[in-house]
Amino acid sequence: MSESRKGCVYPPEHSEFRDRVTGATIHQMTRHPSISHPTYFLHSSFTPDGQAIIFTSYRTGQAQLFEAGFPLGGIRQLTDSDAIHPFSPVIHPDGERVLFVRGGGVWAVERTSLSEHRVHEFPGAQLGECSLDAAGEWITAAIRQDSGFGIAVGRCNGEGWHVIAFPRTVIHPQFHPLEPEWIEFAADPAPRMHRVRRSGSGQECLYKHGNDEFIVHETFLGRTGDLIYTVWPKLLCRMDWRTRERNIIAEFNAWHISADRAGARVLCDTNHPDEGLFLVDVAGGQRRRICLSESSNQGSQWTKSRYALAEDFEAARSARRGALSWMETATDTVYGPQWTHPHPSFSADERYAAFASDRDGHTQVYVADLSRPE
């Protein structure tokens, strides 16, 4: 483990190259021989002003939070205490705070002063990745506590925290962008998509389906308020939030998905086969390849078109050692390790896409320019 401390500034690790297929400009932001990856595909890894990218790195021996000036700035360490949940960080809309999870607690770090405070703690629990409402007032995270599951939700100022119980594993809770009293969340096993009011009322399944309809990676279609999701590995789909009407956007193996604010384009990676990162036109379904990912995209279940059965993840269950979910476990070989997946997301101005790739043997942070190459 190398010596490190909060506030350390390391030299830039930036390099730039052209994608060998599309010619797109690619910025490699990290080069340390350890795992480094953007925050998660559900949130932008860029600060609102576009001047820095927030990422998780294991370069100190455990998962900690860092930022890199974009494109040419140095790398600055933001945390140095107990390890963070590597995919939990989310940047507050004010750009000054980053919220993240340590064990059963939600924490916040100020980017300027590097002061940290614990927003709320659930003793003995494990929380998943964080999600903020559009105003940055409320925060939610999946929770596993004792033998129970659910959604933890409360205000960023530490008030009003409570748990909404659910009988199965919960993954990826997200606030509705226009109606923040609603939270959409995923469940394991099927059926996948559910919603509940922030108060805990109105809990319902949005679409009843079986184990053989492999729905994954649902998120909101920008500020339209509708949902997008993939039926792996066949379809990219849209669901009307109010009527639950489902429509196909495109027929291909879209994997992790992220929409622009207008809901006009979807950014995605692909797998089996990995043909790279794409932008998909929501209205017409046309897609344009941005660049190759050249990630290893590990996880045996992605070769199949159904959710894992007991025999599929028996080995992963023994390896997870109390983690929130098999989907959150770095050692899982059924759906991960997650750091081998690109997880692309837009920059704040939607000109760039951050993604992860272990093309050189260690997962690193990359940024693709989404404009068409000259």
Image (cartoon, rainbow, N blue to C red):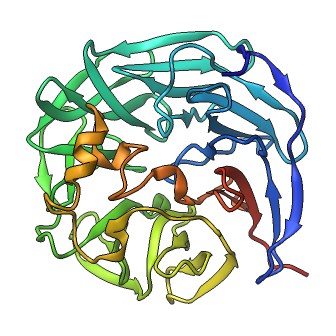
Give the residue drawn at x 24%, y 64%: 242
When the figure is inspected, residue 222 is found, relative to residue 303, above or below; the finding is above
Side (left or right) of 26 relative to 155: right
Q: Which one is nearer the viewer's eye here, 270 or 34?
A: 34
Side (left or right) of 350 relative to 285: right
Q: Which one is nearer the viewer's eye here, 259 or 327?
A: 327
Q: Position of residue 259 (x, y in %)?
A: 52, 64
Give the residue drawn at x 73%, y 17%: 4
Res. 67 image quadrant: top right
Res. 239 image quadrant: bottom left
When the figure is inspected, residue 250 is found, relative to residue 63, above or below; the finding is below
Q: Which one is nearer the viewer's eye here, 267 or 328?
A: 328
Side (left or right) of 210 relative to 60: left
Q: Is residue 9 visible?
A: yes
Q: Is residue 348 visible?
A: no
Quarter of the picture containing the C terminus is: bottom right
Give the residue drawn at x 21%, y 62%: 312
Instruction: Count all numbered tags in the image, as a single digit.
Output: 0
Side (left or right) of 13 relative to 217: right
Q: Position of residue 104 (x, y in %)?
A: 33, 20
Q: Position of residue 319 (x, y in %)?
A: 30, 41
Q: Position of residue 274 (x, y in %)?
A: 55, 77
